[in-house]
Image: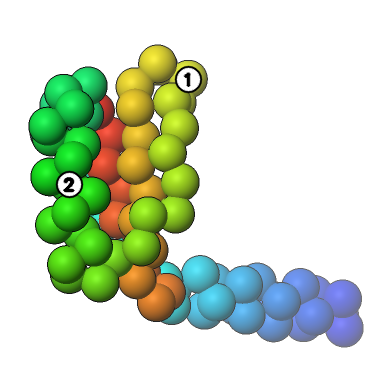
Amino acid sequence: MKKLQLLTIASMLLLSAQMNADVIKINNLNLNNPDVRKCLKEASAQEGWDLKSIYTNSDDKLVFVFSKGKDDKVYISK
C-alpha cells in the first residue's frame, strides 16, 4: 500500500513540475529562407527571447528553439 501511495505522490510531483513551463509551437514559417531566419532572430531578441538551439528534426525540417525564463517557443519550418 505504501508503494502505491509513493507512486501516486511521485507522479503528482512530476506532473506539477512539467506544468510550470509553457511551450509554444509555431509551424507556419519558411525557415529555409535566410531573410526569415534573420528577422525571426532579431524580433525574438528584441522581445527578450534567447536562442537556445537550432537543429534539423527527423523530417529534415529546420527547428529553432527560443527561451525566456521557463517558457520556450519552438519554430518548425514548413
Q: Of all residues shown, which one is farthest toward the top?
A: 60
Q: Nearer the viewer, residue 21 or 38?
A: 38
The quarter in which the N terminus is drawn is bottom right
Q: Is residue 13 toward the left or the right of residue 44 in the image?
A: right
As drawn, the label of residue 58 is 1
Amino acid type at image mark 1? Ser
The quarter of the picture where residue 12 lies is: bottom right
Residue 65, placed above or below residue 28: below
Residue 5 spot, x, y in % from top left: 77, 82
Residue 4 spot, x, y in % from top left: 80, 75
Residue at point 55%, 77% (across, down)? 17
Q: Nearer the viewer, residue 12 or 26?
A: 26
Residue 24, placed above or below residue 13: above
Amino acid type at image mark 2? Leu
Residue 30 spot, x, y in % from top left: 14, 26
Q: Which residue is mark 2?
A: 40
Residue at point 16%, 23% (across, down)? 33
- Report whether residue 27 is seen: no
Residue 2, placed above or below residue 37: below
Q: Is residue 20 toward the left or the right of residue 68 in the image?
A: right
Residue at point 26%, 42% (across, down)? 75
Q: CA distance from mark 1 to mark 2?
A: 22 Å
